[in-house]
Image (spheres, rainbow, N blue to C red):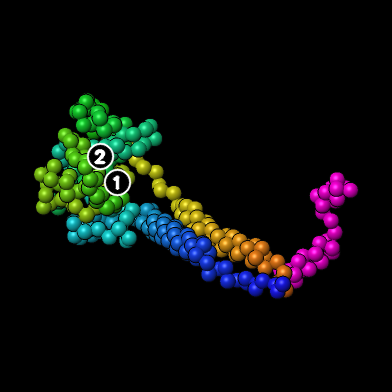
Amino acid sequence: MADATPVGWRFLYSGRWIGYFTMLAIFSIACVFLGNWQFDRRAEARAEIARIDANYDAPAAPLADELSDPSAFDEDAQKWRTVEVVGEYVGDPYLARNRPGRDGVGSNLIQALRTDDGRVFFVDRGWVPIDGHEAETGGIAADELPEPPSGEVRVEARLRASEPTIPGRTSVGRTVASIELPELARLTGTEGEAYTGAYGMLISETPAGEHGVLPEKPERDEGPHLSYALQWYVFIGIACIGVGYAARREYRGLNPDSSVVREQDRRSAERKRRRGLSDAEEEDALIGG
């Protein structure tokens, strides 16, 4: 009886293998997307490090020079920039609630500063251990909040962008859900005269006043994003190797008498002969003998 026609690699055109290749393509696309996402996050972290290096310890510039347009702010160029402003703290402080601190969850103390040119600049005067519930229900004694210096004060602060609105969360009493400057301007009745593009994180005040816990310098750390990004591309390689190995195994099973398989077996036997028996093979031989 004539030998059956060799299957060769035609099995790769079957619906089952087309499904395997489709899954491999989808998996690879997902890995590329995730890898590129990690590259983007690394780029953002490196940009933040560059801003810290350029701005954090730079000499203070006059606020009016740095923010010539009170409603604008260039995050890439101006974040962490140190500014100096002279004015007087006015009105009651507000609390940006639910902020993490060294002693748990508290609030950031936000105070309006009327500058000597008549504008209003909001200053974050540090973290205080007053949680959102205390702040919202008004259970705050007057002496619990740090007192700002009275009269004219010279303030150094680092610029930060106005925070976005948090959907579903609103201002309650003297608390705000985020340091959203247009909302603070509305609450303090300073619309039209307040800086709404950026606020300042307090560095120092002259004369000195009480304030909350001031933040430490951010770490210059780009994180593990590069290794995570490369990891996703390694996964693509592993998946391709796995599919290739499975295809080779199936080829051998479907074409046991082909010249290709016989040549592979011959080479494998030759390598084993040159290498000699492994410990496991010798033990199997002894047990079988």
Nearest to viewer (mark 1 / mark 2):
2
In the depicted structure, whether residue 17 falls above or below residue 118:
below
The verdict on residue 272 being magenta is: yes
Kind of residue at badge 1: Met
| Apparent side of residue 33 relative to residue 146 in the rendered image (left or right) | right
* Mark with earlier residue (1, 2): 2
How far separated are the C-alphas under marks 1 and 2? 13 Å
Foreground of the two, 183 or 17: 17
In the depicted structure, whether residue 100 falls above or below residue 70:
above
Q: Residues within 10 Å of mark 2 (few under 14, many from 20)?
A: many
What residue does disc 2 label?
96
Magenta-colored segment: predominant secondary structure: helix
| Quadrant where the N terminus is found in the figure | bottom right
The verdict on residue 201 being magenta is: no
Q: Is residue 83 visible?
A: yes
Numbered disc total = 2
In the depicted structure, whether residue 58 falls above or below residue 100:
below
Q: Is residue 149 visible?
A: no
Element under disc 1:
strand
Q: Position of residue 248 (x, y in %)?
A: 64, 65
Kind of residue at badge 2: Ala
Q: Tell me which residue sits at (18%, 56%) in the image.
A: 70
Foreground of the two, 122 or 255: 255
Q: Tell me which residue sits at (61%, 61%) in the image.
A: 246
Foreground of the two, 131 or 275: 275
Q: Tell me which residue sits at (67%, 65%) in the image.
A: 252
Q: Position of residue 77 (x, y in %)?
A: 32, 61
The part of the chain drawn in magenta is 261-289
What residue does disc 1 label?
201
